[in-house]
Image (spheres, rainbow, N blue to C red):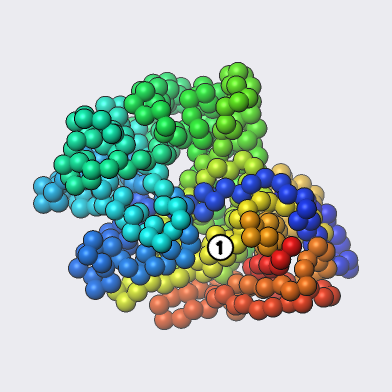
């Protein structure tokens, strides 16, 4: 948790960290990924047979190597909007017998050359050298799919008995169950763009019936309810009806603005959404009489990122060219997840490769976009427990995107210094600071900081700076600080300070 006091321009900014005040645990699952059959995420992204950069499975080795740097704990698959017309059995068995299908979410053709078994194999390869495997998180087809089909998929993945779909998995060369724990009850089924859009009433009835059957088949699975954005009547209603049947509640938010300050402060709308959703979950559990011994119903923020669909249309592959401003917005997003770690059980950046992604593939290799660097630093260091921090700084109190955010921020506005702090299991305290100002450095007094401080900073010449195959304008620099005097947080920068507590 980070508290804030607004100051005037002639006062000295202050950040105070108290590592002894250990608050909520930061679930490592907040650093999850998402791979959808969309654009070049799967084909030409993680899977490109025939490429000199691919292994014997057709998996891009450079992508695997890059993603291992992030230590991703979980990856969602196969969608996304794609899943509303996806039939998983099209994507198993001999590849030359798999059907090509019209794909209605992004108006393409799905070849089904990459399916469940390939995804699980890719996760196995990605997990090499890790203490814990990268967990699969499957999303069920609540559009054209049926309950029978969903039950069959769970049986195929997790079945251990002498039954049809478990035996089909074995026949396809996979004798051991995949042990897929996380299953989503549909994706964005409230949206008018969906095949088989549903009302909240119809969805709730269907979700309960599917949950009942799925748990009879496999009592160990965790089910994720399809929410909206955490601040809607849909979220309120489906939680009220279904909270007893699920383990997490999914919400989706994307932020973007072509004006830097609006872009960098927009993730604060997600913070408010998390707070509202947490209250809705509490209310639903109270009204449903859920036993206090049942584990907390957490938020699954399984689609988040900076994305402007007009700038990068989904049907054209949604390949964003991210700027330094976007990198600062992503750092602010991640600060939100750390600050609100009490409520967030999983978060999945959309997406992992090429499609609105920090990582782009080319014929020659990979490009680490501007947004890669904050994701790398957070996933590497901002783990363990959230600790208390207080920020005394000036603030921005102007117009926001979305517009309603300005009203919820009130007269204090958004701090120029967006902050979170964490104490890792290794005994190091980590302080993440985003200076969202485009023009002003802030010489800041720091309290509670050690004497031998590692400094990691992400910045570039301007908020419009980008990275491409030809040039890298936004980069990571490393240094040291002795902890004496004030520390200056440079304009339009993200800084992570790290010291032994």
Kindly identify the residue that appears in the image at 45 percent across and 34 percent down.
Answer: 222
Kindly identify the residue that appears in the image at 41 percent across and 52 percent down.
Answer: 133
To which quarter of the image does residue 92 belong? top left
In front here: 438 or 33?
33
The percent position of residue 17, horizontal first and vertical second, equals 78, 58
Question: Residue lying farthest right?
Answer: 10
In front here: 26 or 305?
26
- Does residue 462 show up? no
The percent position of residue 458, horizontal first and vertical second, equals 60, 72
In the image, is residue 358 above or below residue 289?
A: below
Q: Which residue is mark 1?
A: 380
In front here: 178 or 399?
178
The percent position of residue 48, horizontal first and vertical second, equals 25, 64
In the image, is residue 239 above or below residue 493?
A: above
Q: Check disc 1 and report its element: helix, strand or loop.
A: helix
To which quarter of the image does residue 82 belong? top left
In front here: 463 or 111?
111
To which quarter of the image does residue 258 belong? bottom right
Kindly identify the residue that appears in the image at 50 percent across and 66 percent down.
Answer: 372
């Amino acid at each position: 948790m980070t508290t804030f006091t607004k100051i005037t321009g002639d006062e000295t900014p202050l950040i105070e960290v108290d590592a002894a005040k250990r608050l909520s645990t930061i679930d490592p699952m907040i650093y999850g990924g998402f791979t959808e059959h969309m654009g070049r995420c799967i084909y030409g992204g993680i899977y490109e047979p025939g490429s000199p950069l691919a292994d014997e499975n057709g998996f891009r080795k450079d992508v695997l190597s890059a993603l291992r740097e992030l230590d991703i704990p979980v990856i969602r698959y196969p969608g996304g909007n794609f899943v509303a017309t996806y039939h998983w059995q099209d994507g198993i068995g001999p590849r030359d017998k798999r059907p090509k299908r019209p794909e209605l979410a992004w108006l393409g053709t799905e070849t089904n050359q990459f399916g469940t078994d390939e995804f699980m194999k890719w996760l196995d390869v990605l997990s090499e050298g890790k203490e814990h495997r990268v967990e699969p998180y499957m999303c069920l087809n609540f559009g054209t799919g049926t309950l029978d089909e969903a039950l069959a998929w769970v049986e195929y993945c997790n079945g251990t008995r002498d039954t049809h779909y478990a035996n089909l998995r074995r026949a396809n060369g996979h004798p051991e169950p995949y042990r897929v724990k996380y299953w989503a009850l549909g994706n964005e089924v409230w949206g008018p763009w969906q095949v088989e859009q549903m009302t909240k009433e119809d969805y709730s009835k269907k979700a309960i019936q599917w949950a009942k059957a799925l748990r009879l088949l496999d009592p160990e699975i965790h089910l994720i309810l399809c929410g909206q954005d955490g601040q809607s009547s849909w979220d309120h209603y489906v939680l009220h009806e279904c909270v007893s049947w699920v383990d997490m509640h999914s919400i989706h938010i994307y932020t973007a603005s072509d004006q830097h300050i609006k872009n960098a402060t927009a993730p604060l709308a997600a913070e408010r959404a998390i707070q509202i959703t947490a209250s809705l979950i509490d209310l639903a559990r109270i009204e449903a009489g859920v036993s206090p011994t049942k584990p907390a119903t957490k938020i699954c923020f399984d689609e988040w990122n900076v994305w402007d669909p007009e700038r990068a249309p989904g049907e054209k592959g949604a390949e964003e060219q991210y700027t330094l401003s976007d990198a600062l917005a992503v750092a602010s997003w991640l600060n939100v997840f750390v600050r609100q770690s009490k409520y967030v059980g999983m978060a999945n950046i959309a997406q992992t490769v090429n499609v609105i992604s920090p990582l782009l593939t080319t014929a020659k290799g990979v490009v680490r976009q501007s947004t890669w660097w904050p994701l790398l630093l957070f996933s590497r260091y901002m783990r363990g427990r959230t600790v208390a921090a207080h920020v005394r700084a000036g603030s921005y109190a102007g117009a926001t995107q979305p517009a309603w955010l300005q009203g919820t921020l009130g007269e204090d506005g958004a701090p120029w210094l967006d902050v979170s702090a964490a104490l890792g299991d290794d005994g190091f305290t980590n302080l993440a600071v985003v200076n969202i100002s485009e023009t002003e450095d802030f010489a800041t007094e720091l309290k509670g900081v050690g004497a031998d401080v590692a400094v990691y900073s992400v910045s570039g010449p301007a908020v419009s700076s980008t990275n491409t195959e030809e040039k890298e304008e936004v980069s990571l620099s490393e240094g040291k600080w002795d902890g004496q005097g004030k520390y200056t947080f440079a304009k339009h920068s993200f800084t992570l300070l790290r010291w032994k507590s």
